[in-house]
Amino acid sequence: MPVDDYMLEIIFKRNSRRYTACNEIPFEARTKNAGHYSLVTVLAASENEPITITWLREYLRVLQTSCDVYSSEVFLDGIVITDSTKEHVLSEECVNSVKRAGTKWAELIQEPHLVDRLTPGPYLYLDGVLRRVYRLYDDTQGCFLTGLRPKLLASDQQPYIQLSASESTYGSLSIAVPSRAPKLEPKAHPHLRVVVKDLFQLKGLKTSLNDKSYYDVSLPSTSTAPIIESLRKDGAHILGMTKLSSMIAREEPLDAVDFPTCFNPRGDGYQSPAGSSSGSAAAVAAYEWVDVGIGSDTSGSGRRPAMANGVWQFRPSHGLVNCEGMVKTWPGYDTPCVFARDFGNLERVLRCWIPRATATAPGAGMGETNTNQKRYKIIVPTDYFASTTNLQQLRFLDAFIEDLRLCLPATVSHFSIRDGWTQTHPPNTDPNLDSYLQDVITRTYYYSFYHSTTEFRQAYTAKHDGKRPYVIPFVQRRWAMGEAVTEEEHEEAKGRLEVYKNWLHETFFGNTNLRQVQGLDQEQKEGPDGQQNQDRESQEVEPETLVILPIANLTPTYRDQPTASPETQSAVDGLFLPPILGAPDVVVPVGEAEYESRITGRKEYLPVVVDVMGRPGRDWQLLDAIGKVMKGSGRVMKVEVGRRMFPGIEK
């Protein structure tokens, strides 16, 4: 296909909706009524059901109700039915029926080269060519850096190309969204619409990291990151690249220089979207036409935006997901993550990343894990709940913990990490945990952050005659701290961090240290059967341990007010707990907290979420447990878009 033809896009408007038509497929309609121009609909014949008037009507009804791109008022000039079996017949009765409804022509296509390329949905037929039609939506929240020209098929190996469609509103991009047209098969489901944080490679595109200097020296990628490619091969449509905090650091709205920070749709619409995966999380929270956002997480880059924007988030265990094609700041701790409004979409993505059949974790295997035969242990680190002062937030967190206890069922233990370290710290270590871990993050994370960007700085300086690249002041300060760390200091800090990691793992998942902490048994609660759940510890079945984390204290964070990012961080911080352990965690939306907005002058709602961490390698077991609790407690498993996650629930 010639490059010029491949890049050609046609934009048109019907009934207040904007569309683009692209991806040419040569097709000569056999019917004279087709003319040279028609807006048509392609349907896929069922393998086990004949083409009848009833079948046609039902297919078009489902299409009208399930697809936001299709409209019966626009795309019924003609109907094309693809038949992969070559056994169907399009009767004269069916043709006459659709003509009476206003359709000018209908054809049955059985040629393999056309059947394979003509996926169901709306098309533009123009001068012997069919072009797939996509709806254009405006990125009113400013989540995207660029939209992408859609790929017609999952097997399309062409490079990604930026979409050249213009916007209809000031200051926003237009994003091309494919049809959700289903096949009328019992297990058929629409393909996911996915947005990707601009630190993952997409073949043919440059990477910006939300920094103009980085984009300047970036080269078009020659391949696509495996985790993105796995979704595309599963049928997902990649809509575009989303904004992030500059250089994958931490950036609040008033810190942004090169690219404005996206808008968080929750509450009054002027709350910080947090970072660094802000664009992906905000897009999922704002747009019905986005199903999944792909981000990354090192020290909260996924969990903080999930909290601020009120969406589900899953962060997989380290080592189970292919991280190639992903720009890293702290190798070994950086990992992809996924955002979704619907819990089921987390599972769909995880099946692409970590199939159950190939899961390497103990107890993971084919099929659903049997949660009814498991024992569960819930650990609540009091260190992080002590700094959570929002009483509404605490009530929602306590209610969720109680649901965990009852629905799994589980024991619940409240445990201080700092006190536990004091009582059971390894030999030859400082009994004060904060003192022991002092400067560890600076000497490991910031050191790595600085050195991971050396090649970028050198490339930019060489290209611009010695000129230094611009990065926001916060990144400059982080680099300066990392640069000041010697290699010897870095290795020594890595050793301390490894000691802490091993102690955490033994404490949470090995049980030895927990049992040594005085008074812990008295804090465990009874299960729903009235017996002490800790009696089950004597059984041979290893308990599934879940750790509950609040992420941060909930408070309004207005985007028009300066919000200081921490200059230094402690490894004791709860945000570092899953990364240090390499453990999976899932952010669960559990409620909404009222506040009086100074922006709108009325009552608004902030999302309340809880972070649940599982044992490293037990990703599917963690998701299965959360799914069981959500269903068993009758909780809502899908949040809505816009200012509220749960608009039908007042409290």
Image: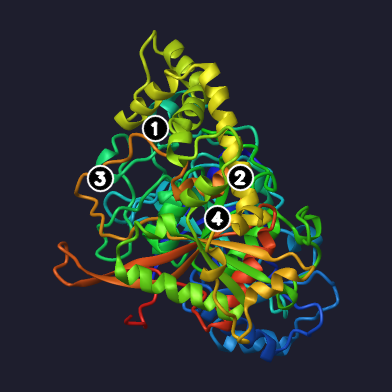
Q: Classify 523 as above or below 497.
A: below
> Which numbered circle lies on residue 338?
4
Residue under label 2: 503
Asked whether the viewer can see residue 12, the reply is yes
- Residue at the location (62% across, 79% down)? 532
Residue under label 3: 563
The percent position of residue 448, horizontal first and vertical second, equals: 51, 27
The percent position of residue 119, horizontal first and vertical second, equals: 67, 64
Q: Does label 3 or label 1 sit earlier along the sequence?
A: 1
> Which numbered circle lies on residue 211?
1
Give the quarter of the image for residue 44. bottom right
- Residue at the location (51% across, 22% down)? 451
Q: Does label 3 or label 4 sit earlier along the sequence?
A: 4
Which residue occupies the foreground of this view, 370 or 200?
Answer: 370
CA distance for labels 1 and 2: 38 Å
Name the kind of residue labelled 2 in the image.
Trp
CA distance for labels 3 and 1: 20 Å
Q: Quadrant of the N terminus?
A: top right
Give the quarter of the image for residue 644. bottom left
CA distance for labels 2 and 3: 34 Å
Q: Quadrant of the C terminus?
A: bottom left
Name the kind of residue labelled 3 in the image.
Thr
Which residue occupies the foreground of this view, 290 or 630?
Answer: 630
- Residue at the location (41% across, 56% down)? 384
The percent position of residue 13, horizontal first and vertical second, equals: 39, 63
Q: Classify 439 as above or below 305.
A: above
